[in-house]
Amino acid sequence: MGGLVLIVNHDGEARRKLRRRLDERGYEAVEAASVAAALELIQRLPRSFRLVVVRLDMPGLSGATMIETLRLFHPAIPVLGTGSREGTAVAIGCPELVDGIEERLHSVSGENGAGAAHVRLPFEVAQRAREHYERTADLVEAAQIVATAVPRV
C-alpha cells in the first residue's frame, strides 16, 4: 500500500515509535509536534498525504480541531485520531486506508467520524472559517475559528 503519512503528536518518542512501525509497513512518515505545524504542511502540500494520524488531546489547537478543519477544507484527506489511552481512536474519511495499520495503533471506534473527535460545527462557525480562509488562505487561522466550536478532548 504505502504512501505518505503525517504523524501529529506533541510526544516526540510516540511520534518516533509510530514512524518506525509505519516504515516497517511500507509507509513514509512526516512528523509534526503541533497541530499548527501539521496544518502548515498540509496547506503547502495538500495532495501529498495519504493519511493523517493525530493525537486528539494535543496542547494548543487540539487534534479534534484539526480533524474538523480537515473535514471542512480537505475532506479527501483521511484522518485517524488517536487518544492517549489504549483503544481510543476515530477514523475519518476512508477507513480502508487504515485497515492495515489500525491494529498496531488502536482500535477504531467509528469509520465516518463517530466518536469523541467528531462534532457538528455550527453553520455560522463553518461559514466564518470558510470566509476567513478565502480572504487569507491561512489554514491555521481558519482552524482557530473552528476551535471556538470544538470541545477539548
Image (cartoon, rainbow, N blue to C red):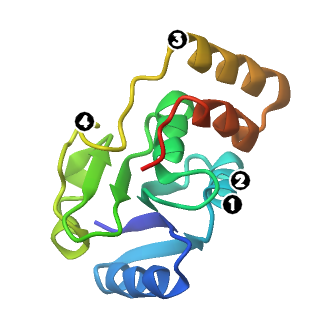
Q: What residue type is disc 2 on?
A: Glu
Q: Furthest residue to the right?
A: 136
Q: Earlier in the sequence, mark 4 or mark 1?
A: 1
Residue type for callout 4: Asn
Dot 4 crowding, Cα within 10 Å, few <14, some 14–19, many 20+: few
Residue at far front of view: 152
Circle 1: residue type: Ala
Instruction: For label 1, count other residues whose C-alpha is less than 10 Å away and answer few (under 14), some (14-19) or many (20+).
Output: some
Tell me: residue 66, above or below residue 86. above
Q: Secondary structure at mark 3?
A: helix
Q: Which residue is mark 3?
A: 123
**Residue 152 image offset from top left, x and y in percent:** 48, 46
Q: Is label 2 in contact with label 1 (beta carbons under 8 Å)?
A: yes
For marks 4 and 2, the one nearer the N-term is: 2
Question: x, y (%) of residue 49?
Answer: 50, 56
| Label placed on residue 37 | 1
The picture places residue 78, in percent across and down from the top left corner, at: 38, 46
In this rendering, the label closer to the viewer, 2 or 3: 3
For badge 3, the amino acid type reads: Phe
How far apart, in angstroms, are the residues tagged by discs 1 and 3?
26 Å
* 72 versus 27 height, above or below: above
Residues 82 and 139: in front is: 82
List the residue tagged with mark 4.
112
Query: Is the Cβ of the residue at disc 1 closer than 8 Å to that at disc 3?
Result: no
Kindly identify which residue carries mark 2: 40
* Above or below: residue 153 compared with residue 5: above
Horizontal side, residue 34 vs residue 117: left or right: right
Q: How far apart are the alpha carbons under marks 4 and 2? A: 25 Å
Element class at badge 1? helix
